[in-house]
Image: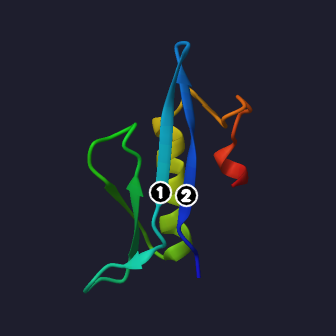
Amino acid sequence: MIRSYELDAFLEDAGQRMPFRLRISAPEETKGQDDYFCRVHAPALFADDKQIFGIDEEQAHELALQFVKSMIAGKRLVDQSGREIDLAKR
């Protein structure tokens, strides 16, 4: 079973640092379908939560993580000390 993913960090872009909160839900089975989705909550990136679908739990979770990575491309994700965070290793 894949658990939810949570991260509180900072997003650096063009010399500015802003709080970055990320929540990716545990995969949920789509009602009446054979696929799964993860809900992505990242208010610094988009106003409404996004649902990312995959054929199984693993794919839904991986696609949700890849979606967030694509949304922050060109920006730095850092912890409170300014150390870069690699989402691939989390």
Image quadrant occupied by the N terminus:
bottom right
Q: Position of residue 29 (x, y in %)?
A: 38, 81
Q: Label 2: which residue? A: 6
User: Which residue corresponds to mark 1?
Assistant: 23
Seen in the picture, residue 6 relative to 73 is either above or below; the reply is below
Above or below 58: residue 5 = above
Quarter occupied by residue 75: top right
As shown in the figure, which amino acid type bears the numbered disc 2? Glu
User: Callout 2: helix, strand or loop?
Assistant: strand
As measured in the structure, the alpha-carbon distance from the residue carrying label 1 to the one carrying label 2 is: 5 Å
Q: Residue furthest front?
A: 80
Residue closest to the eye, 7 or 73: 7
Residue 24 shows in this picture: yes
What residue appears at the point 64 percent right and 47 percent down from the top-left corner?
Answer: 87
Q: Is residue 74 visible?
A: no
On the image, the x and y values in percent for residue 82 come to 70, 28
Identity of the residue drawn at 73% across and 52% down: 89
